[in-house]
Amino acid sequence: MKNKVDQLLVLLLICFLLVNCSENGDEDCTKTITIPQFYIVNGQTYSYDTTQEVPCHLPDIEEPQQIDSPPVLENFTYEVIKFEYTPDTGNNTSRLQFEIKLINNNNISVNGFPYLTIKSDGLEFSTSYSSTANEPCLSLPANSFCIMTFDQESSLDLGAPNSMELLNVIYYLTN
């Protein structure tokens, strides 16, 4: 009988230690989760996942969350090599040409797209030009640059602005 009591006491002690150790271990246990996110710019949806360290007992997030402000590349600069607008080429077209050096001053490579703000006949608008650019610069190497190039003619049948001026360039991040 004493042997069974001893076994029972040992079993209870082991159970107590297991429960107590696992509770203390969970408090210190952390994991890194991926948080799926997306944002919308000019009707186009872009994904941008982030990671976060959380306690182990928290569940993973599977449903993408919409974020209000697109993530912007910090330490980003640009240089305008060429920005030329011709309102009438003489061929019933207008022409916009530009070359912009997009500079990533960070120690990591990034994916994303440039977003240009332009003033046209007194009105400001912003767009990416990425889908029609000769070189859209959808990635920027660490501590390096990419030259975004664009050259497009548009028919004058529907009219054209008299002037276009580049005001600003930012770089939105994607995955």
Image (cartoon, grey):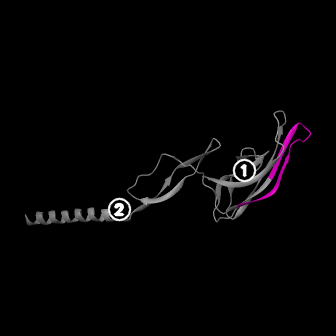
- In the picture of the structure, the residue carrying the numbered disc 1 is 117
In reply to whether residue 38 is colored magenta, the answer given is no
Q: Do the residues bearing badges 2 and 1 touch, measured as CB atoms within 8 Å? A: no
Above or below residue 70? Residue 89 is above
Give, as a single range, the part of the protein colored magenta. Answer: 77-98
The image shows residue 95 at horizontal and vertical percentages of 84, 44
**Magenta span includes 83:** yes
Task: Indicate the quadrant where residue 139 lies.
Answer: bottom right
For image coordinates 85% across by 36% down, the residue present is: 156
Mark 1: give few (<14), some (14-19) or many (20+) Cα within 10 Å: some
User: What amino acid is found at the position of numbered circle 2 in the picture?
Assistant: Asp
Asked whether, in this view, residue 13 is left or right of residue 115, the answer is left
Q: Residue 79 is drawn in which quadrant? A: bottom right
Q: Earlier in the sequence, mark 2 or mark 1?
A: 2
Q: Position of residue 21 (x, y in %)?
A: 29, 65
Mark 2, residue position: 26
Q: Residue furthest left?
A: 1
Q: Is mark 2 on a helix, strand or loop?
A: helix
The quadrant of the picture occupied by the N terminus is bottom left
Specify few, some or many for label 2: CA neighbours under 10 Å numbering under 14, 14-19, or 20 or more.
few
Callout 1 amino acid: Thr
Eyeballing the image, is 152 above or below 3?
A: above
**Where does residue 89 sit, x and y in percent of width and height?**
90, 42
Q: Which of 13 and 84 is in front in this view?
A: 84
Residue at 44%, 52% in the rendered image: 60
From the top left corner, tell me how far across and down residue 83 is, in percent. 82, 52
Q: Main secondary structure of the magenta part?
A: strand
Q: Which residue is depicted at the point 80% across and 54% down? A: 99
User: In this orientation, which residue lies closer to the viewer: 161 or 172?
Assistant: 161
